[in-house]
Amino acid sequence: MEHQTILGMIGLGSKEDLYWISILLFVGTYAMIILEKFFHRVPAALLGGMLAVFLGVVTPESAWESIDHNTMFLLIGMMVIVSVLIESGFFSILSSVALKITKGDPFKIILTFTMLTAVLSAFLDNVTTVLFMIPILISITSKLKLKPIPYVIATVLASNIGGTATLIGDPPNIIIGSLGGFTFMDFIVNIAPIVVVTHIIGTIVFIAMMKFRGDLEPKITDQKEIMRIVEEQRVEYDVILMRKGLIVFGITILLFFLHHILHLEAGTIALFMASILMIWSRENPEKIFERVEWTTLMFFLGLFVVIGGLEHSGVFEDAAHLVAGVITDPISGILILGSLSAVISGIVDNIPFTMAMSYVLIDLGKTATFDVEPLWWALALGACLGGNLTIIGASANVVAAGLSEREGYPIKFFEFVKQGTPVTVVTVIVALGLLWLKYTIF
């Protein structure tokens, strides 16, 4: 016997009805997230997700499957490891060192952090990098009386650009590597050189924007005062706890590199290593879990279910086939698929769209008279770089927003869009232009 839903009871249970109601739910949830003056984004996302289950757009089982458990496990695991490192005083030391190196110069701070973040995001993953960098950045900027939010946003944009370069840097690349059959070296050869150029141009754009807005003006100009802040940084730390935390963190990163050989998801590795650290460190679990960004995790939970509604009712499949339908050759396909992937990934989470589009490209590869490989790279560039468009476009954005809010610096939806859009537009044009040139000339 088929399970009767609330929508079914009122005569709206057909496949077509569910299709349009899933779109309506997504638009409603998105509107609530945008109208943050009236609604906090976390209960807005949870309400949207639970409405999808309550009305029967998705079954509880489908809702559970819609949640990207790898992302959730990765976040919880890395948040626990980072929490222990914060407790040990590790980040206070890094913050002190960064202050000494940059001598409190805002330009040097932004350059150091965006460069370091982009490199780390390529070889870890951008969520882990953001969890690591943002607390240090907020600590430095607030001490120097600078506005932390523009620095946080610039660092997140750099993490998404850097994460585009490799197979393990961003979740869409892991999907593309797995379904398209591409190796780590394929990404290094085809994507990394494009990303290096894109990152340099992207950095110039957001530094120019910050300069124009006056965000790079030092608030403390007296060098003696800056040196006093640097010298005054009293750092209390626990050497034994720090050593344990860093050993576990190091092994976790090593396992991330080997996760394809071990056939383990990054999330499984992170949560496993976090469990080991909690037992080894003998820290109070309640104290550690207090620092875990539960609001961010709840936001993801709700959003995954809302997007799961779109996925289960076939919206992504239709969007993917629509894109494939207008592609007649790989050269125009790069620009069409890349641009549309960037726009869609900026509005919805890029993981389910990449998944749907990947299956379409597999089918297209069987019937097309042309080589579809360039389309895979266009999808990777569009899906990863498009995540910089909005605060919910990529996992790293949501995590950074949660960390920033916890420190007392909430990032508004439109504030992120205002700073993220110019960078996204320029980087997507540059990256797709370079990919197009590569296949046109070579």
Image (cartoon, rainbow, N blue to C red):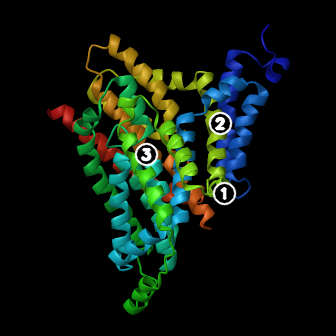
Closer to the camera in the image, 317 or 162 = 162
Residue 442 image point, x, y percent: 14, 32
In the rendered image, the vertical position of residue 353 relative to residue 408, given as above or below: above
Q: Is residue 287 above or below residue 6?
A: below
Neighbor class of circle 3 (other Cα within 10 Å; few <14, some 14-19, many 20+) is: many
- What residue is at 61 percent from the left and 53 percent from the top? 292
Q: Where does the N terminus fall, quadrant-wise?
A: top right
Q: Amino acid at mark 1?
A: Glu
Q: Amino acid at mark 2?
A: Phe
Q: Name the disc covering residue 290, or none.
A: 1
Q: Badge 1: how crowded within 10 Å, few (<14), some, or many (20+)?
A: few
| Helix, strand or loop for disc 2 | helix
Residue designated by label 2: 26
Q: Tell which tag, 1 or 3, sits nearer the viewer.
A: 3
For image coordinates 73% across by 47% down, the residue present is: 43
Tell us which disc is closer to us: 1 or 2. 1
Q: Residues within 10 Å of mark 2 (few under 14, many from 20)?
A: many
Residue 151: which quarter of the image?
bottom left
Q: Is residue 142 left or right of residue 406?
A: left
Q: Kindly identify which residue carries mark 3.
A: 252
